[in-house]
Amino acid sequence: MRDKDRVVAIVCADIHLTLRPPRARRHEPDWFEAMARPLNEIGALASHYDVPVLCAGDVFDHWRAEPELVNFAINHLPRMYAIPGQHDLPLHNLELMKRSAYWTLVLAQVIEPVIHGVATMISEDVVVHGFPWGKPIRPLKDSASKKMQVALVHDYFWVDGHCFPGAPREHESRKYLDRVKGYDAVIFGDNHRGFMTVVGGVMVLNCGTLMRRKTDEAEYEPQVGLLCRSGNIITHKLNTNCDKFERKEEDCNGTKKSMELWDMKDFVRGLGELEKTRFDFVQAIEYAMTKRVVSDDIRRIILEALGRG
């Protein structure tokens, strides 16, 4: 294998570990076993290539994870370099990181934190720059080093066909032309619709969600990236053959039967659409609060109502 084709890291994001399965996965006989499958596959890839794992945020779905879930994470997460996403942070506040379950994984040496503003060497020729939630990516100055420079970012990044309706224009890929300068590759987390693109000659992977959690993700193929020394990224589709996944029409079936007696088909159709857009609405609200002046009390109330407090 030529040096430029050499795999130097396995990259992922948006693991969203939870104690209980989401509705679309409620028929899993063992939810912990179902979560362990993709984690084991990542660990096997890292072992095969003898490289570290990079995670671009949202290890947990909630910063205050239950002890049983934290124990599971300690036992099943591959050792990784990571940055926190907003779900890993109390009130989405980076300054409160040490109150979180994410920080427990740091103390347990499961996670090696990539600290914002501090270049982290993950091997003798690869340097990672971390941009956790709330710290937008900045161009890399004085990048004459022969070492590979990688940006690990948790921020909403999108292209057409891979975003929620009304996604903020300032986060569209073309707006990042200046921001990705100096890097050999950029890895994004936060947007659950995975894709790869090139911005200003730089390969950019938005990893997408690691586990399908919503009924409208029935056709989605979770993926991780194989980051090469050249800056190229090879996507690896995870094995989902054992997933017990409830499709949208199956999820709505019982509701439709119970409502047909009242001839409320339009209402039922609307309920079905709510499932399709539920996460997009939550994501839009969370994003809006970062762009508006919202008091801590109001922010806490809203996040608790959304199940994110």
Image (tube, grey):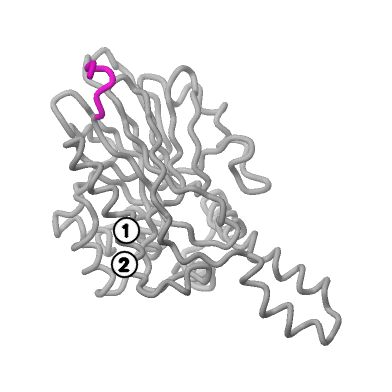
Name the mark on residue 37. Answer: 1
The x and y percentages for residue 106 are: 19, 55
As drawn, is 266 to the left or to the right of 49?
A: right
> Can residue 3 be found in the magenta stretch?
yes
The reply, left or right, for residue 182 in relation to residue 119 is: right
Mark 1, secondary structure of its residue: helix
Give the magenta-colored segment's residue range. Answer: 1-7
Cα gap from disc 1 to disc 2, whole angstroms: 6 Å
Q: Are marks 1 and 2 in contact (CB under 8 Å)?
A: yes
Extreme-right residue of the structure: 263
Quarter that holds the N terminus: top left
- Residue type of the residue flagged with mark 2: Glu
Specify few, some or many for label 2: CA neighbours under 10 Å numbering under 14, 14-19, or 20 or more. Answer: few
Is disc 2 placed on a helix, strand or loop?
helix
| Residue at image point 23% right, 30% down | 8
Rendered location of residue 195, percent (x, y): 50, 37
| Mark 1: amino acid | Arg
Vertical arrangement, residue 162 with respect to residue 283, above or below? above
Please report the residue visible at 41 percent of the width from the left and 43 percent of the height from the top: 237
Q: Nearer the viewer, residue 252 or 152?
A: 252
- Residue linked to disc 2: 33
